[in-house]
């Protein structure tokens, strides 16, 4: 069933929007309050009341295979996130945030009925979940999130820059409350996860990373994310909060997994050469990341490590080509040639052309340059060779061949 906006849902339930009063709530006998289902309390803000459930986990708490630690170095993660190291941000400066909403479409019709937030202190990891028992409690929920954030300076999310932050900013604006999100440092770990694991994992969803990277399996209390909007609408209609317990479990684990992933990636980016990374694909992904960040010394070592660990054939030759190109940029011609020759012997046209260029313009060995040019021509004109490859390379190679033949004759 297509999810309607909260307003449309409330209308379908008989709620009169605007100045008219809503219908009376379900009879007390049919209601199960959230306070009777989830451990928590009702707190008061300047905008009214909202329900909050708070859990405290000691530092060292094991989430999957990760012991939560608020004292890790963030230099690599901040560099990746383009956050100045002069900001002196530490783990306790960040709030880990995830929302549960009435739909995924965004816009003013989508409402965050639960905002889960977590932060490190000197002794604990505090996780609070603010829940709207009724849509009228939204301003109080937003104010409570502001209060939780007040000791901190930045945010950590998973797809939050695209979804959670714009949604919350919209809700703050609609209620005339100042949002704590604009201008604050924001680390969204989804793009980083895509960079690190796109070659190996079929999915980079937080749930998939939990099992594949963090070593966590959720219990039967878990509810699928796609069911959650309808569960909230059912709760509003029936007054029965029992099913919402599963939503709290889902959201709490999202926050804990976000903190664990934050820690794992921070350690990975700060200690890439000393951490045990069993899969070569992950090592190469990290090498590409450090290359893009400009740390070529670390990238070289990671490329060498990943190639030595073994890769699927397609990725191996692609990696050899990229590594050789990087070595060329930094003037490491000997290393580049060794990599090109390995790929060229495998029939890699780009490597054959690079060797022809090197010997013509760098080493001055015109005989070798001509040999590699003709080897490349043989590759693109061989029976069964790709017509696209031939169209792309043949004309240029024949011009190069004629130029080299002329130079050899003149020399």
Image (cartoon, rainbow, N blue to C red):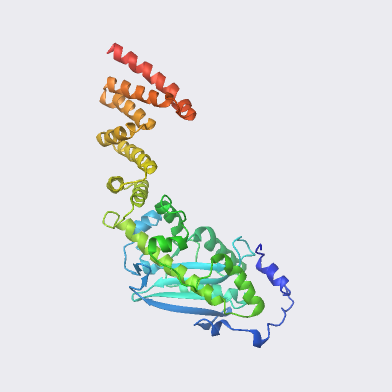
Q: Nearer the viewer, residue 403 or 88?
A: 403
Measured from the top left, where is residue 333 in percent x and y? 27, 34
Tell me which corner region of the image, top left, top right, bottom left or bottom right, holds residue 86.
bottom left
Quadrant assignment for the N terminus: bottom right
Q: Nearer the viewer, residue 45 or 164?
A: 164
Tell me which corner region of the image, top left, top right, bottom left or bottom right, holds residue 21.
bottom right
Measured from the top left, where is residue 403 in percent x and y? 36, 17
Q: Nearer the viewer, residue 152 or 276?
A: 276
Outermost top residue: 410
Tell me which corner region of the image, top left, top right, bottom left or bottom right, holds residue 27.
bottom right
The answer to whether one can see residue 153 in this image is no
Residue 232 is left or right of residue 89, and the answer is right
The answer to whether one can see residue 97 in this image is yes
Number of labels in the image equals 0
Q: Nearer the viewer, residue 283 or 21?
A: 283
Q: Residue at x 47, y 75 (%)?
A: 128
Q: Residue at x 55, y 61 (%)?
A: 166
Q: Residue at x 37, y 26 (%)?
A: 376
Measured from the top left, where is residue 195 in percent x and y? 42, 51
Residue 2 is left or right of residue 114, and the answer is right
Quadrant assignment for the C terminus: top left
Outermost bottom residue: 29
Measured from the top left, where is residue 257 in percent x and y? 42, 66
Does residue 239 sit above or below 176 in this rendering?
below
């Amino acid at each position: 069933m297509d999810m309607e906006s909260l307003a449309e849902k409330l209308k379908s339930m008989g709620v009169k929007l605007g100045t008219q009063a809503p219908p009376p709530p379900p009879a007390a006998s049919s209601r199960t309050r959230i306070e009777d289902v989830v451990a928590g309390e009702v707190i008061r803000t300047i905008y009214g009341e909202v329900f909050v459930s708070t859990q405290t986990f000691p530092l060292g708490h094991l989430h999957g295979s990760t012991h939560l630690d608020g004292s890790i170095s963030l230099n690599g993660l901040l560099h990746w996130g383009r956050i100045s190291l002069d900001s002196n941000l530490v783990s306790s400066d960040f709030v880990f945030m995830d929302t549960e909403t009435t739909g995924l479409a965004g816009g003013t019709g989508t409402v965050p009925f639960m905002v889960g937030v977590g932060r490190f202190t000197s002794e604990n990891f505090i996780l609070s979940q603010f829940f709207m028992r009724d849509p009228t409690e939204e301003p109080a929920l937003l104010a409570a999130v502001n209060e939780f954030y007040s000791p901190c300076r930045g945010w950590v999310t998973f797809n939050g820059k695209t979804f959670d932050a714009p949604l919350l900013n919209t809700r703050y604006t609609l209620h005339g409350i100042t949002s704590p999100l604009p201008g604050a440092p924001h680390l969204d770990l989804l793009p980083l996860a895509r960079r690190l694991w796109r070659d190996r994992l079929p999915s980079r969803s937080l749930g998939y990373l939990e099992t594949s990277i963090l070593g966590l399996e959720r219990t039967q209390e878990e509810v699928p994310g796609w069911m959650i909007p309808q569960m909230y609408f059912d709760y509003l209609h029936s007054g029965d909060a029992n099913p919402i317990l599963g939503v709290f479990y889902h959201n709490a684990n999202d926050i804990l997994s976000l903190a664990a992933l934050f820690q794992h990636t921070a350690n990975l980016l700060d200690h890439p050469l000393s951490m045990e990374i069993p899969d070569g694909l992950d090592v190469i992904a990290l090498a590409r990341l450090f290359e893009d960040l400009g740390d070529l010394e670390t990238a070289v070592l990671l490329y060498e490590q990943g190639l030595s660990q073994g890769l699927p054939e397609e990725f191996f030759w692609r990696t050899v080509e990229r590594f050789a190109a990087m070595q060329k940029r930094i003037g490491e011609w000997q290393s580049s040639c060794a990599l090109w020759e390995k790929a060229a012997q495998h029939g890699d046209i780009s490597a054959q052309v690079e060797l022809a260029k090197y010997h013509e313009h760098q080493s001055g060995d015109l005989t070798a340059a001509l040999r590699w040019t003709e080897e490349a021509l043989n590759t693109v004109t061989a029976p069964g060779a790709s017509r696209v490859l031939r169209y792309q390379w043949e004309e240029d190679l024949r011009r190069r061949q004629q130029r080299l033949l002329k130079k050899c004759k003149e020399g």
